[in-house]
Image (spheres, grey):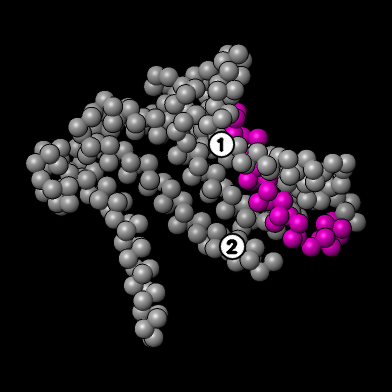
């Protein structure tokens, strides 16, 4: 191994330590008692480890926030996949007047900060009587997004046209082509999009904070922020909530990592 490789690996190791250290520190803090955290260094190991912070989350009704977040994320994920696939296929394979202009105008909305649309969306939901409801949480996000449609369109354009033509010669209509040809051939990129959608919606904070009030439709991020306000000095409780929020995402990433790597490799080759 050359000295250059050694330096590269040392740099990567240093970056990994810097990246992972806050998560390790948060995990250790979640098992630390409030008394020890207040009297000793935050870098001290729990003596002994305790589950009282996680039991405190259960007493605070944190389980309901997890359930609401899981349902909201699942509905948005289903809508994103269905509508993004349909729109991306139309932009990639169907021919109609103004297709490319419409696509690039739609993609250009990626340049608009999300905070700009918060007030108009809030007024729309309030006028429709949907404020502080389940539908107010999911409707703005479940009909596709510019990023998702752009990502899928570029991938769909790389699918050999002979496959689609062969399906049409066998009598398949557009929906059959999408279901039986395009979607199976695009499984890696769809898995990647699913993971991106789940992570973004699981961590969504601003819109749920604005459109909901009370604990009925409170999502995970808002509930965690509420813990910081309600229990200002109990950071051990906040770290327990953060750990609970991160674990499902880590499990999901590990389960889907092979498909994600495959989508990157296939996209790069094409």
Question: Which residue is more in the foreground, 253 or 154?
Answer: 154
Secondary structure mostly seen in the magenta stretch:
helix
| Vertical placement of residue 254 versus 95, above or below | below
Residue 91 in sight in this render: yes
Quadrant in the picture for residue 242: top left
Please name the residue shown 17% across and 44% down the image. 32
Q: CA distance from mark 2 to mark 1?
A: 27 Å
Q: Magenta stretch: give its range.
A: 138-167
Residue at mark 1: 113
The C terminus - image quarter? bottom right
The percent coordinates of residue 38 (x first, y second) are 12, 39
Q: Is residue 164 above or below residue 210?
A: below
Q: Would residue 165 be counted in the magenta stretch? A: yes
Residue 138 spot, x, y in % from top left: 56, 30
Near-viewer residue (155 or 3)? 3
Q: Secondary structure at mark 1?
A: loop
Task: Indicate which disc residue 264 carries.
Answer: 2
At 22% from the left and 49% from the top, the residue drawn is 28
Q: Nearer the viewer, mark 2 or mark 1?
A: 1
Q: Is residue 187 left or right of residue 214?
A: right
The answer to whether residue 138 shows anywhere in this view is: no
Query: Residue 93, image x and y in percent?
Result: 81, 51
Position of the N terminus by quadrant: bottom left
């Amino acid at each position: 191994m050359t000295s250059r490789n050694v330096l590269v690996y040392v740099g990567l190791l240093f970056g990994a330590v810097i990246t992972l250290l806050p998560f390790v520190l948060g995990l250790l803090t979640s098992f630390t008692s409030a008394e020890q955290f207040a009297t000793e260094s935050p870098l001290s190991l729990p003596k002994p480890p305790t589950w009282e912070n996680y039991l405190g989350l259960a007493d605070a009704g944190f389980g309901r926030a997890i359930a609401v977040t899981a349902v909201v994320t699942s509905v948005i994920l289903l809508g994103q996949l269905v509508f993004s696939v349909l729109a991306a296929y139309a932009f990639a394979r169907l021919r109609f007047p103004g297709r490319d202009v419409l696509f690039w105008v739609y993609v250009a909305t990626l340049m608009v900060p999300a905070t700009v649309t918060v007030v108009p969306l809030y007024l729309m939901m309030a006028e429709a009587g949907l404020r502080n409801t389940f539908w107010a949480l999911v409707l703005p996000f479940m009909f596709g997004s510019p990023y998702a449609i752009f990502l899928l369109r570029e991938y769909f354009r790389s699918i050999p046209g002979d496959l689609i033509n062969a399906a049409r010669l066998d009598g398949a209509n557009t929906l059959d082509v999408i279901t039986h040809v395009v979607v199976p051939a695009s499984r890696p990129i769809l898995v990647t999009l699913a993971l991106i959608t789940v992570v973004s919606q699981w961590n969504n904070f601003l819109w749920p904070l604005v459109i909901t009030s009370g604990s009925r439709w409170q999502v995970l991020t808002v509930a965690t922020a509420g813990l910081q306000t309600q229990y200002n000095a109990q950071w051990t409780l906040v770290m327990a909530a953060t750990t609970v929020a991160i674990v499902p995402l880590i499990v999901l990433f590990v389960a889907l990592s092979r498909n994600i790597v495959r989508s990157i490799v296939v996209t790069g080759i094409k």
